[in-house]
Amino acid sequence: MTVEEIGNQSIMINETNNQKKKKYKKYPNRRIYDTSTSKYVTLPEIAETIKKGYEIEIWDVKLNEDVTALTLTQIVMDLAKKNRNLIPIRLLHLFIQAGETVMHEFFENYFAKTLESFITYRQQMEEQFKLYMDLGMDFSTKSKDFVDQLNPFQTQQK
């Protein structure tokens, strides 16, 4: 673990996966304190920190226990309140039906890896598409030709 200075913040870097880490303390008054900036923060601010690529850890000072998972769940639920279709109802039913053990195994072993792969793939595709657009490539005729080649019902020209 090393410490990197970013602006006026000290950020811990986990050397095994190059993940930036931030530590927070949660006090009995339900306020969350950012130990690197010496300021209280809100849940939306923590969400923004995570979007910037930081891994966070939140410790409850009174109970002396890690409350990171509970806090992150609260952030997801707040997002779900704003966007009622964030998590499909059928999926929520399956979560409840499956039980805690199956859900934990699913999230730990499959969902996280699948989502990470999807995000990486999406970023690569966006970068590739941007590159093509910057080069001024015209896809209108290229895509039609490609789709025509895939059409099994197309009559072949001799």
Image (spheres, grey):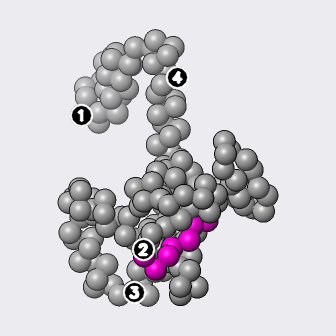
Which contiguous range is marked in magenta?
22-29
| Tag 3 secondary structure | helix
Question: Horizontal placement of 22 versus 145: left or right?
Answer: right
Please rate how many residues cluster around mark 2, counting C-alpha atoms within 10 Å: few if below 14, some from 14 to 19, many from 20: few
**Label 4, label 3: how many angstroms apart (C-alpha)?**
44 Å
Q: Local crowd at mark 1 within 10 Å, few (<14), some, or many (≥20)?
A: few
> Which residue is under mark 2?
30
Where does residue 141 sit, x and y in percent of width and height? 34, 15
Mark sitting earlier along the chain (3/2): 2
Q: Quadrant of residue 74?
A: bottom left
Q: Which mark is residue 100?
A: 3
- Point out the tag, 4 or 1, that comes first from the N-terminus: 4
Three-letter code for the amino acid on which mark 2 is drawn: Arg
Label 3 neighbour load within 10 Å: few <14, some 14-19, many 20+:
few
Give the residue number, with chain letter if any, for mark 4: 131
Seen at 54% across and 48% down, the residue is 52
Secondary structure at numbered mark 4: helix
Quadrant into which the N terminus falls: bottom right
Q: Earlier in the sequence, mark 3 or mark 1?
A: 3
Q: Nearer the viewer, mark 4 or mark 3?
A: 3
Q: State yes or no: residue 21 in magenta.
A: no
* Quarter of the image where the C terminus is located: top left
